Image (cartoon, grey):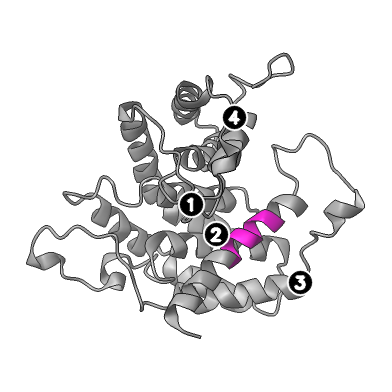
Amino acid sequence: MDHASFHRMTRLAAWIFSVLAFWIVPQARTAESDTSASRQEWKLTPAVASNFARIALRCVSREYPNKPDHVFNDENDLLSPKAMHPSFYGCFDWHSSVHGHWMLVKILQLFPDLPESGQIRAALGANLTADNIRREVQYLDQPGRKSFERTYGWAWLLKLAEELQGWDDNQGWEWSRNLDPLVQAIMGRYMDFLPKQTYPIRTGVHPNTAFGISFALDYARAAKNQKLEQVLVERSTTYYAADKDAPLSWEPGGEDFFSPSLIEADLMRINTSVISKKTRW
């Protein structure tokens, strides 16, 4: 398999698995369970989960090829991906590595007895150390890095943090504690950036604002971080509450990997300041 195909497969696996996981795992967003035959067809099996796990395991410790989102401040910044990002250096780019780690955590939660469970724990343990995360934060604190992975990578980092925080597992708790300094740094970037962003980014690719807010809002509510939640709800309301007549005939765009209209609708579905039993949006 060539490098480009491997990267596409890895990204597709993470997205497919996330869809499957949201179908079969009870979510705070779900009003009631649906046992219809059509939904049962989406059931994730251990065999399929093992396949996803093997894809992510091949990826999270694979340093090259690599597409860094990197600003060089001087010659001292000529570093390898692993030197810059000791936790999230694999999977071609930083955000793909992050959601690869999320997928491994989710798989381990759902299927703790998979044949790959030992490999999954070893990979997570090797990458999510306190020292590695400290160096990830140091990278973000350098000049010219405020826009690093904004907001797609930020969103996936908080999704990984949400998954770890809600997991009743001793190693999961350790990895959650280790990850926390990076979580704090990413939350600070949300709080700093979003109030300055006048207009949302509506494209169906990485910078999409609705996607970035949606995952962050999930985390804020799971972590009971009211300050972050307030900012996210206010921004999503300001950006989208007056929207109507979405141009669905324009979708998909040639580079889209999700629908700008549907991702916005999903965000507003969980924005309780706008959507209620008495309000239609």
Which circle's residue, 2 or 3, is located before the other in the chain? 3
Which circle's residue, 4 or 3, is located before the other in the chain? 3
What span is colored magenta in the figure? 13-20
Left of 40 or right of it: where is 159? Answer: left
Q: Which residue is disc 3 drawn over? A: 46
As drawn, the residue found furthest toward the left would be 75
Q: Closer to the observer: label 4 or label 3?
A: 4
Name which residue type carries label 3: Pro
Instruction: Answer whether labels 4 and 1 touch (C-beta < 8 Å).
Output: no
Q: Which residue is disc 1 drawn over? A: 156
Q: How many marks?
A: 4
Name which residue type carries label 2: Trp
| Picture residue at 41% right of the left edge, 38% below the top | 201
Instruction: Answer whether labels 1 and 2 touch (C-beta < 8 Å).
Output: yes
* Magenta-span inclusion, residue 37: no
Q: Which residue is disc 4 drawn over? A: 268
Q: Position of residue 126 (x, y in %)?
A: 44, 72
Secondary structure of residue under mark 4: helix
Name which residue type carries label 1: Trp
Residue 102's disc number? 2
Residue 38's disc number? none
